[in-house]
C-alpha cells in the first residue's frame, strides 16, 4: 500500500510517497512559489540527486498534477501510474474542538475544517485548497486528515481554559489548543518502544525544539499539558516568536510605538524570540557561533531559550507527579548537543543525568542518559510524514 502524504502551505506543497509495506520513503519533494512567478518543483527519488523542474504552477491543482507527473515519470518516477497510490494523508493544522483524532475526509469533514479556519487563518485555508486539489486530480482515492491539534484534545479542562470570563470561551472557543501534536505523539510512542515498556504506564516529557518549539506532558499515552496555546505564539521563546509574555506589554507597545494590531502581531511572531534578543539570526547555529565569538546578546538568547525549556520540564514533572523519560526532537532537539546539555544541567535531583559523550549524537536515536540515571533522556528524530501515513493506513483499513 502506497500513501501520498501532503503538507500544503499558501504558496508551497510538500510531499512524500511512502510504501507502507516496509515504511520506506520512495520519493519526496516540494512545490515552491505556487501562484507566483518562477515557480518550480524540487523532486527527489530516494537514493538519487534531486531534480528541479521549472513549471508555471498557477494554483495547487496544477502543483498536484505536476507531483503526479514526477512520481510516474519514466526517469525520475517511482510508480507506473496514479492507480498505485492507495490513499492520501493530509496534514491539517487546526481541528479546533471538532476533531480529537484523524478522520477520513468527506464533505462534512471538509466543511468542519473550513469552520476551523478562523482559528488558523494562515494555515487551514491552504490545507483545504490542498485537499480540494487532490480530490480533483484523484477523485476515487480515499483521503485522511491528520490534525496538529488533535493529540492535545485529551488535556483536562483546567489545563486548556484561560482565566478569562467563561462567556468568551463559549462565544469564540478561545482556549489553549496546542500544536506539533503529530510529532509529540510519534516520539512519545517511539520512546515507549525504545524503553520496552507499555506507554500506558509511562510519564514522558517531549521537547519538540525547532524554529517553532513546544513541549508536551504525555501521561500514560495521552497529552495532559502542552506549552503552546490558542496559537503557536504561547510558551517557549522560539526562532522569531516571543513566547509567553505579560499581556500588558502588548497595549504598552501599541501605545508607545503607535502600532496597529497587525504591527504588534508581526512584532511578536516574526521579529522577536532569539532573533529579537540576539540581533543576529533566528538560526541557532548562527547564534551559537556568534556567542562563541563573544557576542553577549547571542549568549543571552541561548540562555533564555534553555532556561525556559528547563522550566517547562520541571513544571510538567510536577503536573504528572513524576517523569520516566525526557525526549528531544526536531531540528534543535535532534542536532544541538550544546542546547540539550545546557537545558539538563543541574537537574540531577530529578534523576536526570546525561552522558556528555553520548550527547554528541546528531539526528539519530540514542539514549544519552548515564547508566545510573533514574530518568531516561532520549534523542528521537521526529517523522511526522510517517506518522500521517500510519494514521491514513489505520483509518482506511478500519473504514472510519
Image (cartoon, grey):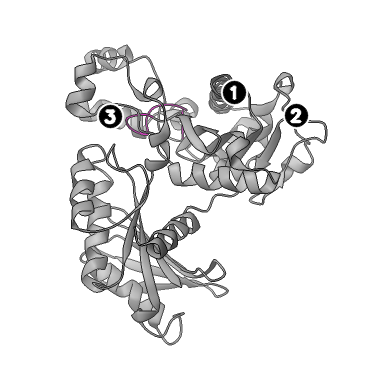
Outermost residue, bottom side: 74
Of labels 1 and 2, earlier in sequence is 1
Query: Residue at coordinates 23% horizontally, 48% vertically from top-left?
Result: 113
Q: Mark 2 — residue?
A: 374
Residue 345 placement: quadrant: top right
Of labels 3 and 1, earlier in sequence is 3
Q: Mark 1 — residue?
A: 317
Q: Which mark is residue 78?
A: none
Residue 379, visible in the rendered structure: yes
Q: Decide: is 343 above or below 192.
A: above
Q: Residues within 10 Å of mark 1 (few under 14, many from 20)?
A: some
Residues under labels 3 and 2: Cα distance? 42 Å
Of labels 3 and 2, earlier in sequence is 3
Q: Mark 3 — residue?
A: 265
Residue 232 placement: quadrant: top left
Would you say residue 236 sits in the magenta stretch? yes
Query: Residue at coordinates 29% horizontally, 17% vertically from top-left?
Result: 250
What is the secondary structure assignment of the residue under circle 3? helix
Which range is magenta? 229-238
Amino acid at each position: 500500500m502506497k500513501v501520498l502524504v501532503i503538507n500544503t502551505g499558501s504558496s508551497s506543497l510538500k510531499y512524500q510517497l511512502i510504501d507502507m509495506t516496509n515504511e520506506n520513503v520512495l520519493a519526496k519533494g516540494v512545490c515552491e512559489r505556487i501562484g507566483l512567478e518562477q515557480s518550480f518543483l524540487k523532486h527527489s527519488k530516494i537514493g538519487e540527486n534531486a531534480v528541479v523542474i521549472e513549471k508555471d504552477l498557477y494554483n495547487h491543482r496544477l502543483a498536484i498534477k505536476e507531483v503526479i507527473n514526477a512520481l510516474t515519470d519514466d526517469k525520475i518516477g517511482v510508480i507506473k501510474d496514479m492507480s498505485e497510490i492507495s490513499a492520501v494523508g493530509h496534514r491539517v493544522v487546526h481541528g479546533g474542538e471538532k476533531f480529537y483524532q484523524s478522520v477520513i475526509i468527506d464533505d462534512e469533514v471538509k466543511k468542519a475544517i473550513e469552520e476551523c479556519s478562523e482559528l488558523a487563518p494562515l494555515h487551514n485555508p491552504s490545507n483545504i485548497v490542498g485537499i480540494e486539489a487532490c480530490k480533483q486530480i484523484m477523485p476515487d482515492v480515499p483521503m485522511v486528515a491528520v490534525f496538529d491539534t488533535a493529540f492535545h484534545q485529551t488535556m483536562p479542562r483546567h489545563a486548556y481554559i484561560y482565566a478569562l470570563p467563561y462567556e468568551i470561551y463559549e462565544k469564540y472557543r478561545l482556549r489553549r489548543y496546542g500544536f506539533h501534536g503529530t510529532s509529540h505523539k510519534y516520539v512519545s510512542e517511539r520512546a515507549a518502544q525504545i524503553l520496552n515498556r507499555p506507554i500506558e504506564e509511562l510519564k514522558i516529557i517531549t521537547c519538540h525544539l525547532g524554529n517553532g518549539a513546544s513541549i508536551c506532558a504525555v501521561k500514560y499515552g495521552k497529552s495532559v499539558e502542552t506549552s503552546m496555546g490558542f496559537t503557536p505564539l504561547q510558551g517557549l521563546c522560539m526562532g522569531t516568536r516571543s513566547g509567553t509574555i505579560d499581556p500588558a506589554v502588548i497595549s504598552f507597545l501599541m501605545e508607545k510605538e503607535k502600532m496597529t494590531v497587525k504591527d504588534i502581531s508581526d512584532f511578536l511572531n516574526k521579529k522577536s524570540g532569539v532573533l529579537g534578543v540576539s540581533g543576529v539570526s533566528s538560526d541557532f547555529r548562527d547564534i551559537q557561533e556568534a556567542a562563541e565569538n563573544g557576542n553577549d546578546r547571542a549568549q543571552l538568547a541561548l540562555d533564555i531559550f534553555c532556561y525556559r525549556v528547563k522550566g517547562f520540564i520541571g513544571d510538567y514533572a510536577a503536573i504528572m507527579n513524576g517523569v520516566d523519560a525526557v525526549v528531544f526532537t526536531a531540528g534543535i532537539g535532534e542536532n544541538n548537543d550544546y542546547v540539550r546539555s545546557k537545558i539538563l544541567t543541574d537537574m540531577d535531583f530529578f534523576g536526570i543525568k546525561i552522558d556528555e559523550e553520548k550527547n554528541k549524537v546528531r539526528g539519530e536515536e540514542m539514549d544519552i542518559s548515564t547508566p545510573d540515571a533514574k530518568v531516561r533522556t532520549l534523542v528521537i528524530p521526529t517523522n511526522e510524514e510517517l506518522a500521517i501515513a500510519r494514521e491514513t493506513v489505520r483509518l482506511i483499513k478500519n473504514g472510519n
